[in-house]
Image (cartoon, grey):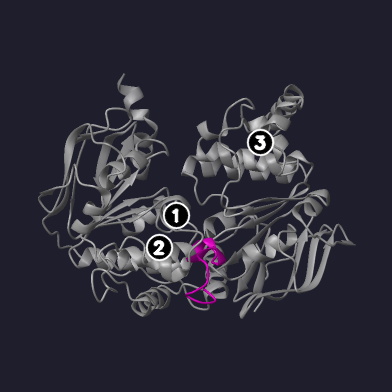
């Protein structure tokens, strides 16, 4: 099925044309005879569920993966891309989901390193003309409206600023086509707005952009055309009008794209329970003596409490204090009336806490291990796959992992495959499934649907609501206000490590939440 709107006059020539591109990884058909044309100066959206083949296709375009068959044309000429260097030389730049910046180096040093051999050391970087590089970085940054200091060390930058540096890296060598893989997955709403403006500026300057995204509003706002992949093949394409005469036309197009993507209509969120159980999490005057607190907060069984705020306002520190990764210097934490303030992380998990980390690569998965091993992480006492405390049954662990893969629709060649063989979204589904399998009293869910497609997001929401309806408590930390308003019962706003506002979702005023987050109310009172 192909959905089209009224054609636009004077279509530009193709910047990229892929014909019959296929790629298999063992029995997994990641790409199946894909045809894709991206017009010069357009923003072309690429939609699809986790594992649909989007990232594989773009890694083929960027020379990171060799296709089994097919033809690639860049600017109307056949291209053989054996490496990322070949792609860069052909004018293709790519920004992947996970940043590749070296934190200890400055922005200018990272930009230079991005164009040099990966085998060169920092000593080689220092031998270059960093002043000239800084001047060029400033010129490019100002022209595009980035506002990036080339002398700043990347480890000190916000997530939004690091995203801009990654884009600068891609443009540094003169890329005319930019591939962005889920660029707003880790961004706060204000950072996402800045990125949208940046992409539109790049398009006005003639840059061609391929945007991989799960976010339908993002696709509808930015893209001129969208291609939908499902099960490694093209399911359909559509033109996206710049404006819609009738809002119903937009809703119809969105619904068609969702059906192309997941093969059915958009899933509905289950109805909510109004029953509130006793307090599960109780936080009193909690502080780390540095960047967080003091904070008082209760989360009851039977409710989902969302913590929102501009990134870097205490959300990460709050989670670390709750799970024992950061030292409490004042106040306390209780779980079901049990004081857990001085407990170890494992002791807290044994008491009934589960945690979906914001950074799954650093805190949730072990890259060198299989799906079976990763599904077992954190079950130190061996349950539910230990016949005795001293022996973990491989067969039971495999069955446990297979259950998570089945229930949460994790796309993998095998449960014995390395977790790195999974797409980012499927890794996230494995982590979410593992943590839900603990049947926790308190689920701390930090960005639980980051990188997930529409169907998988709905499944995670349904699971969290199910835990809540069984009397469990959910603490949701999310940058996605749509997610917050979809499933949260109560919203708490953090700014500078403290609670500055609280409201029920039913009574929430999104403008007021924005004022709390930005500190506008405080400025007006001072």
Using the image, tell me which numbered label, if any, was put on residue 360.
Answer: 1
Looking at marks 3 and 2 on the same chain, the residue that comes earlier in the sequence is marked by 3
Per the image, the residue denoted by label 2 is: 431
- Drawn side of residue 498 relative to residue 66, left or right: left
For image coordinates 59% across by 53% down, the residue present is 221
For the view shown, which residue lies furthest in the right direction?
A: 77
- Label 1: state its secondary structure: helix
Tally the numbered discs.
Answer: 3
- Can residue 352 be seen by looking at this rendering? no
Return the x and y of residue 524 as percentages of the image width and height: 34, 23
Per the image, the residue denoted by label 3 is: 110
Front residue (pair 287, 124)? 124
- Label 3: state its secondary structure: helix
Looking at marks 2 and 1 on the same chain, the residue that comes earlier in the sequence is marked by 1
Residue 39 falls in image quadrant: bottom right
For image coordinates 69% across by 30% down, the residue present is 123
Return the x and y of residue 344 as percentages of the image width and height: 24, 47
């Amino acid at each position: 099925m192909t959905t089209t709107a009224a054609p636009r006059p004077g279509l530009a020539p193709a910047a990229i044309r892929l014909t019959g591109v296929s790629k298999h990884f063992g029995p997994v058909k990641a790409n199946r005879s894909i045809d894709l044309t991206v017009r010069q100066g357009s923003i072309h959206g690429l939609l699809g569920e986790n594992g649909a083949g989007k990232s594989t296709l773009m890694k083929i375009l960027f020379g990171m993966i060799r296709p089994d068959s097919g033809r690639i044309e860049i600017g109307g000429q056949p291209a053989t891309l054996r490496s990322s260097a070949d792609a860069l030389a052909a004018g293709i730049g790519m920004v992947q989901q996970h940043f590749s910046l070296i934190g200890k180096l400055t922005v200018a040093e990272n930009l230079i390193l991005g164009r040099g051999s990966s085998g060169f050391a920092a000593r080689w970087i220092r031998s270059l003309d960093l002043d000239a590089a800084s001047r060029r970085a400033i010129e490019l940054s100002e022209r595009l409206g980035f506002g990036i200091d080339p002398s700043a060390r990347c480890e000190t930058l916000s997530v939004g600023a690091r995203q801009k540096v990654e884009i600068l890296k891609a443009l540094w060598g003169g890329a005319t086509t930019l591939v962005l893989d889920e660029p707003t997955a880790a961004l706060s709403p204000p950072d996402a707005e800045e990125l949208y403006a940046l992409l539109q500026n790049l398009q006005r300057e003639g840059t061609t952009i391929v945007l991989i995204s799960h976010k339908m509003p993002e696709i509808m706002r930015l893209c001129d055309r969208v291609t939908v992949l499902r099960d490694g093949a093209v399911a359909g394409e559509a033109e996206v009008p710049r404006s819609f005469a009738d809002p119903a036309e937009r809703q119809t197009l969105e619904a068609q794209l969702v059906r192309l993507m997941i093969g059915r209509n958009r899933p509905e969120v289950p109805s909510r329970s109004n029953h509130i159980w006793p307090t599960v999490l109780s936080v009193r005057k909690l502080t780390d003596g540095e960047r967080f607190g003091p904070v008082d907060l209760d989360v009851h069984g039977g409710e989902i409490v969302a913590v929102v705020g501009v990134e870097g306002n205490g959300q990460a520190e709050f989670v670390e204090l709750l799970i024992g990764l950061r030292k409490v210097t004042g106040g306390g934490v209780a779980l079901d009336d049990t004081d857990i303030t001085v407990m170890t992380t494992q002791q807290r998990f044994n008491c009934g806490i589960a945690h979906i980390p914001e950074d799954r690569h650093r805190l949730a998965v072990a890259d060198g291990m299989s799906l079976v091993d990763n599904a077992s992480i954190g079950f130190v006492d061996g349950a539910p796959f230990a016949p005795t405390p001293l022996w973990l049954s491989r067969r039971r662990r495999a069955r446990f992992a297979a259950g998570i893969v089945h229930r949460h629709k994790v796309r993998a060649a095998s449960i014995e495959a390395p977790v790195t063989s999974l797409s980012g979204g499927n890794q996230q589904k494995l982590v979410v499934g593992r943590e839900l399998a603990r049947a926790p009293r308190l689920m701390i869910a930090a960005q639980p649907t980051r990188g997930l497609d529409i169907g998988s997001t709905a499944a995670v929401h349904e699971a969290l609501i199910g835990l809540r309806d069984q009397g469990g408590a959910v603490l949701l930390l999310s940058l996605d206000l749509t997610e917050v308003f979809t499933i949260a019962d109560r919203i708490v706003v953090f700014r500078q490590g403290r609670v500055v506002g609280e409201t029920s979702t039913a009574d929430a005023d999104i403008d007021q939440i924005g004022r709390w987050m930005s500190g506008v109310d405080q400025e007006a009172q001072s």
